[in-house]
Image (spheres, rainbow, N blue to C red):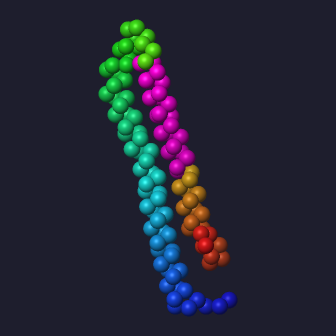
Amino acid sequence: MQELSSVQHGVMARTSIIGTVHVWLALGMLSFMPVLELIVVLYEGYYSIPSYHLVRIRNNMDPFSIAYCLLASIRLMHVVVMAISLGLFGYHFTAGFFHVDGGNHAYK
C-alpha cells in the first residue's frame, strides 16, 4: 500500500471534516422538523379544539368540527411517524457515514 502525498492527505482531511459537519447539520435539521410540527399541532389543538370544536360536536354533532378533530389527530399521528422515520434515517445515515471498515470510510 502506498502512502498518501501531502496534497492527497489534505484533501482527505478536508473531506472528512466537511462531511462530518454536514452530517451533524443534517441530523440537527431532521431532528428539529418533528419538534416544530408537534408544537404547531399542540398549539392549534390547545386553543381551538376544546374551546370551539368539542362544544360544537357535543351540542349538535357538527360535521365540520368532527372532520377538524379527525384531521388534527391524523396530523398528530403524522408527527409521530415522521419522528420515528427521521430517527431511523438519522441513525442509518450517521452509522453509514461514520462506519470505518479497514481504514476506508463508507462514504467514499
Instruction: Tell me the quarter of the image containing the N terminus.
Output: bottom right
Q: Is residue 99 left or right of residue 19?
A: right
Visible in this render: residue 100?
A: no
Question: In percent of the image, x 53 and y 55: which residue is there?
Answer: 90
Question: In percent of the image, x 45 and y 15: which residue is there?
Answer: 63
> Vertically, is 1 above or below 41?
below
> Residue 49 at x, y = what percent?
37, 23
Asked whether residue 2 is drawn in magenta, I would say no
When asked about the image quadrant of residue 45, the answer is top left
> Vertically, is 2 above or below 91?
below
> Residue 72 at x, y = what percent?
44, 29
> Vertically, is 32 above or below 105?
above
Residue nearest the observer in this picture, 36 or 64: 64
By secondary structure, the bulk of the magenta-drawn segment is best described as helix
Please provide the residue range marked out in magenta: 65-87
Question: In percent of the image, x 51 and y 82: which residue is there?
Answer: 11
> Residue 35 at x, y = what percent?
41, 45
When asked about the image quadrant of residue 51, the answer is top left
Visible in this render: residue 95?
A: yes
> Residue 38 at x, y = what percent?
41, 39
Direction front: furthest residue = 64
